Image (cartoon, rainbow, N blue to C red):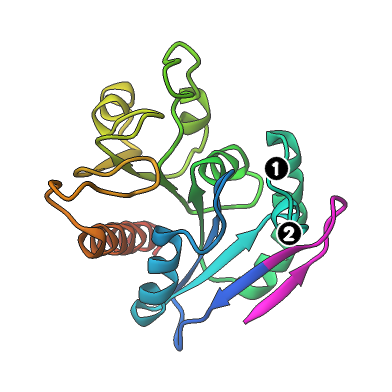
Amino acid sequence: MDIAAPTSLGPGRLVVAPAASPRAVLWIGHGARGGIDAVDLAALARALPTRGITVVRYEQPWRVAGKRVASRPAALDVAWRETAPLVDELAAGLPLIVGGRSAGARVACRTAGEVGAAGVVCLAFPLHPPGRPETSRLAELLQPEVPALVLQGDRDTFGTAQTLAEETAGHDGIRVVAVPGADHGMKTLKSSPLGAAGVAELVVVSVADFIDDVLDRTV
């Protein structure tokens, strides 16, 4: 189900994969170079509704408009905030978990408190630009006051799973799950321990388990 999402920056789009008997809603955004059909986002949309979780993928206005270059972070946040009331209507009082991949994960972290999220899911959080570890975005990841899950490849040039685990050590609310052999796009080498299907399964199971834990806390 596709829903137009008007914003002051132009129309965005919500693509809803509804659960038959939903227990929660996962609202998730895309990265700065890919769209909502990224392998991990698509895997979540296929699998989570069977586990009682409605998945709402958000396409930012710049992407709907066919542009190749993403808007600046502040503009991404504006569009996300302005779409939040529409997502709230879809959630109809159910717990809302927000998230995204790469730039979308940053948006979710920065706005989690404002939209009333019960948890945050980060896929390939861009801890720093490639080759520039001194330009850290750790503060954004630490911003949410709710539990956060980070699924990170151990070949990610924006920050490996090991680096993220070390940087977030001592922050009990953040769970880092390594994706063996995966890069920033969750792609693996032929020699990697997991292929594409294994990566998708790891993402789905990890996110589902995390959301179950979040729901247990809200009871």
Residue corresponding to mark 2: 83
Q: Which residues are magenta?
A: 1-13
SS at mark 2?
helix
User: Closer to the camera, 132 or 7?
Assistant: 132
Q: Are marks 1 and 2 in contact (CB under 8 Å)?
A: no
Indicate the amino acid at tag 2: Thr
Of the numbered discs in the image, which one, if any, rests on residue 166? none
User: Closer to the camera, 11 or 184?
Assistant: 184
Indicate the amino acid at tag 1: Asp
Kindly identify the residue that appears in the image at 38 percent across and 73 percent down.
48
Q: Magenta includes 33?
A: no
Q: Magenta includes 11?
A: yes
Of the numbered discs in the image, which one, if any, rests on residue 77? 1
Q: Is residue 212 left or right of residue 178?
A: right
SS at mark 1?
helix
| Depicted 162 relative to depicted 4: above or below | above
Q: Is residue 8 left or right of residue 178?
A: right
Q: Position of residue 33 (x, y in %)?
A: 57, 45
What is the C-alpha distance between the residues marked 1 and 2? Answer: 10 Å
Q: Residue furthest bottom?
A: 20
Q: Earlier in the sequence, mark 1 or mark 2?
A: 1
In the rendered image, is residue 103 in sight? yes
Kindly identify the residue that appears in the image at 62 percent across and 61 percent down.
58
Q: Position of residue 26 (x, y in %)?
A: 49, 64
In the rendered image, is residue 92 in sight? no
Q: Residue furthest top?
A: 134
Q: How many marks?
A: 2
Q: Residues within 10 Å of mark 2 (few under 14, many from 20)?
A: many
Q: Position of residue 166 (x, y in %)?
A: 26, 23
Q: Residue furthest right?
A: 8
